[in-house]
Amino acid sequence: MKSLNRTTVEAQTYTERILQFGEGNFLRAFANWMFHEMNKKADFDAGVVVVQPIDQGLVKMLNDQDGLYTLYLNGIKNGEVLSEKDVIDCITRGINPYENNADYIANAENPDLRFIISNTTEAGISYNADDKLDDAPQSSFPGKITALMYKRFQTFGGASDKGLIVIPCELIDRNGDNLKKIILQYAADWNLGDEFVEWINEDNIFCNTLVDRIVPGYPRDKMDAITEELGYKDNLVVEGEQFHLWVIEGPESVKDEFPSEACGLNVVFTDNMEPYRTRKVRILNGAHTTLVPVGYLYGIDRVRESLEDEVVGKFLKNALFNDISPTLDLPAEELSQFSADVLDRFRNPYLAHELMSISLNSVSKYKTRVLPSVLEFVKRKNELPKNLLFSLAALIAFYKGDRNGTAIALKDDAAVLDFFKEAWASNNFVEVAEKTLSNTDFWGTDLTEIDGLQEEVTTHLEAILNNGMKATLDAFVK
């Protein structure tokens, strides 16, 4: 059977305007798909040169396919279950700087280069004091960028119109700010001069970002059927969900150069991304954490099945719309749409997301993802968020380690597991609730000091233990 390349399928070639660090599944199913859409629908004319950020990677495989790969987007779109596929053709070539650093550095001399995109994992934006300017290449990702930007500065004499827009996608807070800080550190270490530092500060834009799309990746277990369907061999097939969100914090000028709106892409340009980060943590991540102990003790194993269940699905919807959304400061319409999107994502029939896989470190997750909503709800409304406190009671019951006579494979820090093992040894739910809620190591505060919270959680915990989760939740939701 023929292999996928530019002789196998019809594909366009675009002006190389984007340098991308990372060739993995996420960028190919997220950023490259968006560039593909903007090329097709908004004359973006942006070809992508992919740089392999570490010694081992997929660049050779990418070059063997002339930069092409098939993307499947599976999930719920506009209320309908939908699977779509397309051959993404925005990547022009790949470079392994560990084999040919000169090819990498030569990108600095490209007058059309405008954007740098990256996803080098959370550890990628890091400083290595051993990196030197004459390394070929530098070991760190920021070191490689600094060398390239300095070459560009020299090539074009510090021209202001040859600065770059840097849009990192690494999952760390203030990713653009952190990357710029390290680049400036290398500029100082390598004595690159005040004029270069001024060019970095004045003529280059470093954006902070928030990215969101579930990317299961290469569908190894389905490749025989996929290959038969496609009619060609593609070693870089990637799957992603339909939902996507890219929040880019930067000046308005970035939006002017990035025609995502014309393509209907869910890209948000803002001068303050923190409300969007908070929304994601509280609604998306918070919904997962709120659901896990309730759904699992109810007898459900997967996220999708939880949403399909009338009672558990209603509970989660109530938690999202009644308890979490009122604590956030974005427009109500945006929060409602995002919450609805989250529920659709949870219903995705193409994903088999196990509740137990989300249960890892549930105590710390509740603290960071759910407790802020609890505290803000109390502050704003002077009453208790009933659904979130029901989930907290379920969490305490979950750490008893038993589901209808079957042991739960609890996974958490040893200190957390030891605490609950000792607490539940008494089998006194009142004591367990009090010890858990007053544990400042867990929550950073004593939750028993909030009026009515201990009583509410203890009442729910008693009902769960005595009547079982199913009967208790059925009565609670009605």
Image (cartoon, grey):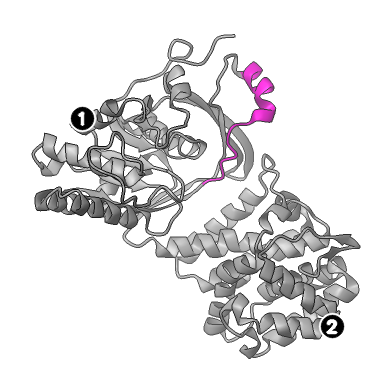
Q: Amino acid at mark 1?
A: Asn
- Magenta stretch? 213-229
Name the outermost residue toward the front.
130
Mark 2 element type: loop
Look at the image and say whether residue 373 sits in the magenta stretch.
no
Q: Residue at x 38, y 42 (%)?
A: 118
Expressed as whole percent of the image width and height from the top left, the position of residue 398 reads: 77, 67
Mark 1 element type: loop
Q: Is residue 291 visible?
A: yes
Q: Residue at x 27, y 37 (%)?
A: 135
Report the label total: 2
Q: Around disc 2, counting alpha carbons within 10 Å, would you say few (fewer than 14), some (14 to 19), or many (20 or more)?
A: few
| Left or right: 64, with 240 as reference point | left
Expressed as whole percent of the image width and height from the top left, the position of residue 334 reads: 48, 60
- Closer to the camera: disc 1 or disc 2? 2
| Left or right: 58, with 214 as reference point | left
Earlier sequence position, callout 1 versus callout 2: 1
Q: Is residue 68 visible?
A: no
Q: Is residue 45 above or below residue 210?
A: above
Expressed as whole percent of the image width and height from the top left, the position of residue 384 reads: 64, 82
Look at the image and say whether residue 214 sits in the magenta stretch.
yes
- In the picture of the structure, the residue carrying the numbered disc 1 is 110
Q: Quadrant of the C terminus?
A: bottom right
- In the picture of the structure, the residue carrying the numbered disc 2 is 428
Q: Amino acid at mark 2?
A: Asn
Expressed as whole percent of the image width and height from the top left, the position of residue 189 reads: 21, 52
Q: Quadrant of residue 43?
A: top left
C-alpha gap between disc 1 and disc 2: 70 Å
